[in-house]
Amino acid sequence: MNNMAEIAEAIKRSQNVLICGHITPDGDSLGSILALGLSLEKLGKKVTMAGPDPVPAIYDFLPGASRFRTGSPPEDKFDTLIVLDCSVPERLGEGYRELLERDLVVINIDHHAGSVSFGTYRYVDRLTASVGEIIFELLDMLGIEITLEAAICLYTAIVTDTGSFQFENTTPDTHRRVARLLEIGVPAARINVKLYEEKPRESVLLLGAALNTLSFSPCGKVCWMTVDRELIKKSGAEDEHTEGLVNYARSIRGVLVGLLFHEISENKYKISFRSKEPLDVNKIAAVFGGGGHSKAAGCVLQGDLREIQEKVVAAALSAIGGNGL
Ligand code: 5GP
Ligand code: MN
């Protein structure tokens, strides 16, 4: 583990930089990549921002979003790879993970509880709500002035990873940083409309269908939703519209663990875990080869849906039991 000054020095030495995040990018991943990428260009670096999966339409408004390259990794003579918000190499995605074996300086910046060690330089702050906040501090240390464009990206990273400042990971520092971003001129209300008030119709229709699948354990403490390929097709929705659905399962009184079983391809399920205090779902997801944060985690399992649901719900119930609740 390195300190931020060492990370800043490594970045100063770089010339041709590739910046990546995690598969199925979210607001923190994209906002952090774009804020850092646009800012490093001000330092005269050659910057490429890329990942295997496309930018979800809801993030199209982010400055620089059209510069984010998708598909296989770009072929260029990069000297440095910066990996943001990616807890394990596998989450870099196909083609990108292999870059770790190339002759590149790898700078890994993350904030996940389940973050594993990789990279030449590594900075992980598990107490910071979003990687966007780490980038905010890093830009300060690099002496780069935060432009309005970068500020919009950082605000989006922070507002999405803190659940609009509602999650317990939100700290006084989070608010101090956001105050600076607002002073720079970030139109917070307009961004929140873009993020939360302009959903495509299909996404809300998918929510309606998903709510019909809600199931509960007999004790009422575990609640799950199932979104299979057919449900997505029937709603006319896209996979990216499943984002946030799991929060409805957790939002019910008495529920301690909310789950979403999302069929990402035939018989392959992405499972999202959300919990309320004091349950740590990072530990439950880790049992199935996944990870994340204590209140939000995920994993991917292949096989029969009923069998997968049985074992995941049983693991959640056992974690609840283990907490003496
Ligand atoms: P979500 O359910 O929103 O996709 O993810 C919640 C959190 O869990 C995120 O912080 C994400 O990085 C992490 N996460 C989601 N899926 C996986 C996975 O398959 N493996 C690991 N290690 N972390 C995951
Ligand atoms: Mn994050």
Image (cartoon, rainbow, N blue to C red):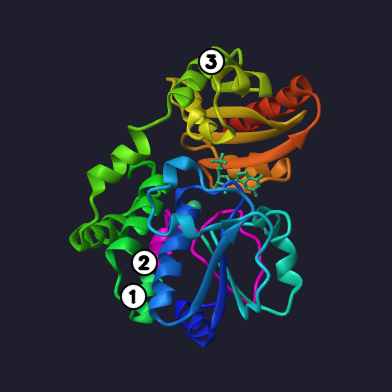
Label 1 neighbourhood size at 10 Å, few (<14), some (14-19), many (20+)?
A: few
Which residue corresponds to mark 1?
140
Which residue corresponds to mark 3?
209
Residue 40 percent location from the top left of the image: 43, 75
Q: Which residues are magenta?
A: 111-135
Q: Element at badge 1?
A: helix
Q: Quadrant of the C terminus?
A: top right
**Mark 1 touching mark 3, by CB under 8 A?**
no
The answer to whether residue 7 is seen in the rendering is yes
Q: Is residue 296 found left or right of 100 in the rendered image?
A: left
Label 3 neighbourhood size at 10 Å, few (<14), some (14-19), many (20+)?
A: some
The answer to whether residue 127 is seen in the rendering is no
Tell me the number on the disc at residue 136.
Answer: 2
Residue 184 percent location from the top left of the image: 21, 63
Residue name at image x 54 percent, y 12 percent: 212
How far is mark 2 from mark 3, CA to CA?
Answer: 39 Å
Tell me the number on the disc at residue 73.
Answer: none
Q: Amino acid at mark 1?
A: Asp
